[in-house]
Amino acid sequence: MTDAEAHMMQLFCELHSEMPRQGPGGAAYTRQAFTMLTGLPPHAEVLDVGCGPGAQTLTLAALETGAITAVDNHAPYLAELRTAAEQQGLADRIRTAKQDMTALDFPAASFDLIWSEGAIYIMGFEAGLRAWRPLLRAGGFLAVTEATWLEPDPPAELAAFWGEGYPGMQNVEAALATVRAAGYRPLGHFTLPDSSWWTDYYTPLEARLAAFESHYQGDESARQISDMERREIALFRKYARYYGYVFYLMRLEP
């Protein structure tokens, strides 16, 4: 990573620090997804990939009695999660590990369930499904949220933005075909409502931007980050019906 890239990453993480979530979601949707995993063994071993500050990790710990290993490559997020876990009396069941999701260092067949909210896009949907598959035990489960086209023919400015930001975005039918091709059986899916983007993500992020811009006035990297964030928020406000996050639940085929 160059010095410029490191600076950009530092600024991005600073803007997003101590946010309730690092992407769309909510405890109610984590719980809804979990109830769809029929057949999960008691005291399941869980891996939460790209956990961020761990809002969904804490929700999972209230639903599942097994150990949860939460992985992220940003140490301050893991520190936030450890503090919250201690405060909630969950430190004995939530372990954290600073790792790159593209090169997870765990033995094969270590987990009954892999969970990932708002993070698999970093690798790409298909790449993540295939890379994490060996970490699951026979008949293991995978639950992920993925940015998904909800309607055909998105407006040109929206298609151009996501064509640059996430060119691999698919519609639901294509995503389910990807799930099957990667060796999983789909168990169900549902779209997160628009409110899941605003309540704990875009609204607090938008509130931070003015102070961030003022503090880093004259910093070109900060301006680029701020412009990108404002553009993304504006596009969702205008075109939310065309895309969203979909929760996909699946099970490893025998």
Image (cartoon, rainbow, N blue to C red):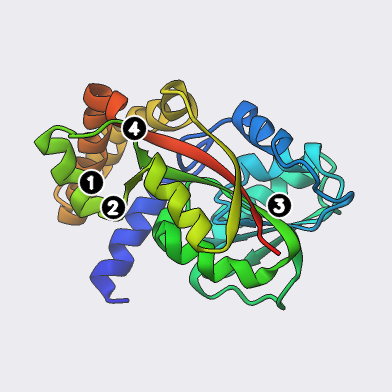
- From the image, state whether disc 2 or disc 4 is nearer to you: 4
Quarter occupied by residue 3: bottom left
Give the Cα distance between marks 3 and 4. Answer: 36 Å
Q: How many marks can you see?
A: 4
Please tell me whether mark 4 sits on a helix, a strand or a loop: loop
Q: Identify which residue is drawn at 64% across, 72% down.
A: 134
- State which tag comes first along the sequence, 1 or 4: 4
Placement of 131 over or under 187, stated as above or below: below
Which circle, 1 or 4, is nearer the viewer?
A: 4
For label 1, the residue is 162
How busy is the neighbourhood of tag 4: few (under 14 within 10 Å), some, or many (20 plus)?
A: some
Mark number for residue 82? 3
Sequence-first disc among 2 and 4: 4
The disc labelled 3 sits on which kind of residue?
Arg
Report the amino acid beneath label 1: Trp
Read off the residue under disc 2. 166
Dot 3 crowding, Cα within 10 Å, few <14, some 14–19, many 20+:
many
- Residue 103, compared with residue 198, is above or below; it is below
Whether residue 189 sits left or right of residue 211 in the image: it is right
State the CA–CA distance, disc 3 to disc 2.
31 Å
Residue under the point 74% across and 72% down: 109
Residue topped by disc 4: 150
Type of amino acid at the residue the image marks with label 2: Tyr
Above or below residue 234? Residue 43 is below
Which element carries disc 1, helix, strand or loop? helix
